[in-house]
Image (cartoon, rainbow, N blue to C red):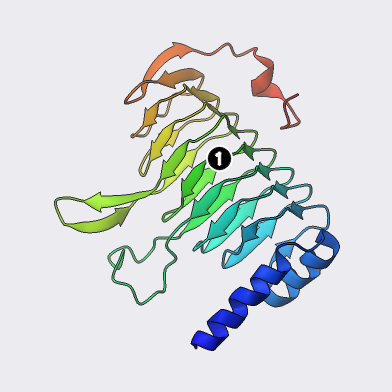
Amino acid sequence: MIFLNLLETLVKALIVPLHWSLKRPLLKLLFHYHLEPSARIGFSWVYPHQLCMGAGSRIGDFTVVVNLQALTLGGYSTIGRSNWITGFPYGTPSSHFAHQATRCAELIIGEHSAITKDHHIDATNRISIGSYTIIAGYRSQFLSHSIDLNLNRQHSEPIVIGSYCFISTNCIVLGGSALPDFSVLGAHSLLNKSFHESWFLYAGMPAKRLTPIDRDAAFFSRSIGFVL
């Protein structure tokens, strides 16, 4: 078993620097990933159990994706460089999260959405990001699990980010929280609960609903995710 694990790790390492014309067929053959021909993975370690990349989607260089059950990128969505994306898949012999039989360690990114760079995404429980949403700036943390102090055990909750959202730099988003469609999360904010009213700026430590958003702002009606 140890030999097989070492062999698998070696094969993965050899695939990482390959050109996409070679990398894509190998990933499809060996790991049964669903990868559109126009999708791209850079010089990155991206090995979830299941991977689905839509047309035009991108994963940049120096990003690490490990210990995920599934990673799904919608069409033209992007994960930038130097991101750390991890989780804790189910079906392991570990006693961690044994009480959460329906938990799924997955990251789902809608079409035309983007995670920029230098972010930490802990998808021990499902993290879903809608379409045309940007996780902007640097060093934001999405933490779907923590320790339940009352029960003295690891516990996880999903995170839901809507469509046409803008999450500013250096935010913390905790498990069980939600940001509705057409919302902004201000810089250095802590999102630790579920909000449901669209068209507002949420900000603070912890985040609160603040000022309304201009519904005519072009960001919230764009048909192409990339912002010049």
Q: Quadrant of residue 102?
A: bottom left
The picture places residue 116, in percent across and down from the top left corner, at: 62, 37
The picture places residue 36, in percent across and down from the top left corner, at: 78, 58
Q: Amino acid at mark 1?
A: Asp
What residue do we see at 51% from left, 27% from top? Answer: 169
Task: Specify the quadrant that holds the C terminus.
Answer: top right
Residue tagged 1? 118
Query: How many discs appear?
Result: 1
Please name whichever residue, 221 or 98, is drawn nearer the observer in this view of the structure: 98
The picture places residue 185, in percent across and down from the top left corner, at: 47, 25
Left or right of 32 on screen, residue 139? left
What residue do we see at 63% from left, 50% from top? Answer: 62
The picture places residue 115, in percent across and down from the top left corner, at: 60, 39
Determine whether 207 is above or below 40 in the image.
above
What residue do we see at 58% from left, 34% from top? Answer: 163
Specify the farthest residue to the left: 150
Secondary structure under badge 1?
loop
Determine whether 148 is above or below 4 in the image.
above
For label 1, count other residues whose C-alpha is less than 10 Å away and answer few (under 14), some (14-19) or many (20+).
Answer: many
Left or right of 137 on screen, residue 32? right
What residue do we see at 53% from left, 30% from top? Answer: 181
Left or right of 156 on screen, residue 142? right
Left or right of 22 on screen, residue 93? left
Determine whether 224 is above or below 122 in the image.
above
